[in-house]
Amino acid sequence: MRETIWIIGASDGIGAALAQEWAGRGARLILSARSADRLGALAASLGPQHIALPLDVADRHSIEAAAAKLAGIGPLDRIVHLAALYDPGNIADADPERAAKIITVNLTGSFHIAQIAPPLLRAGGQLALCGSVAGYIGLPQGQVYSATKAGVINLAETLRAELAGRVDVRLICPGFVDTRMTKTNDFDMPAMVTPEAAARAIIKGLKSRRFEVHFPRRLTYVLKLLRALPYWAALPLMRRLVR
């Protein structure tokens, strides 16, 4: 049976690769992001059965308008929310307006999706929010991005409990993926993967029973171990990373 999947943040990077992978497996896609031109080109390249639906996750009314259009399509099988902003650097150097925008898009946007999206799903349908390994622990140069992703992780955990039995809530935590976003980094990024590899890992993980989809494991398990350490052990290691 063909799945109907809504990907939010589909215009490039992981979202675009995920759209291409799922389309190749026969899914029907609704593709959303702010860029109408890129969305339209992607949808057209994938086939006439796919829909481009521009929206801005920072604008609740924009999400509500998109949801109203989707209500007429019928129940969705999956919703995958990937949209995010990123701006690496030290907290002291952060631009306050840019930081506020990152919080609005990454965290408040995820909250809007968490409220608005579930009624669009069939019974037992899947809602996946995108955290990050940067949300596991306060990493150097993570700035406000890491804080927002920690919030998304917490939000997904809460939803998993609140919506149990009605919605299959999942959490996606990628490591470093070779995208436009990570090209702004000026530090070494271990275990980098391609968007295509990330898309395959996400699809495999969402088909499993695991709550969290995290990859690549050679990076994520190290960071999970760092998070599990008591502060007296973890914080000195963090200071070494800063140096």
Image (cartoon, rainbow, N blue to C red):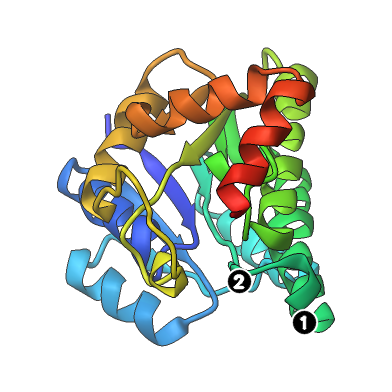
Q: Which mark, by number, is residue 87?
A: 2
Identify which residue is drawn at 45% across, 23% down: 221
Height in image: 211 above or below 3? above
Residue 209, quarter of picture: top left
User: Residue 122, percent across and down?
Assistant: 56, 31
Q: Amino acid at mark 2?
A: Asp
Q: Which mark, by number, is residue 42?
A: none
In what element is the residue under mark 1? loop
Identify which residue is drawn at 44% across, 42% down: 174
In what element is the residue under mark 2? loop
| Quadrant location of the C terminus in the rendered image | bottom right
Q: Examine the rendering and report whether any part of residue 89 can be seen.
A: yes
Residue 51, quarter of picture: bottom left
The residue that mark 1 highlights is 95
User: Residue 179, percent across and down?
Assistant: 35, 65
Residue 24 in the figure: left or right of residue 131: left
| Quadrant location of the N terminus in the rendered image | top left
Marks 1/2 in contact by CB < 8 Å: the verdict is yes
User: Residue 135, percent across and down?
Assistant: 64, 42
Residue 83 in the figure: left or right of residue 144: left
User: Residue 59, percent across and down?
Assistant: 76, 72
Height in image: 99 above or below 177? below
Q: Examine the rendering and report whether any part of residue 78 can be seen.
A: no
Identify which residue is drawn at 46% across, 83% down: 36
Q: Amino acid at mark 1?
A: Asp
Observer-nearest of 59 and 94: 94
Marks 1/2: CA distance? 10 Å
Identify which residue is drawn at 27% across, 48% down: 193
Residue 108, quarter of picture: bottom right
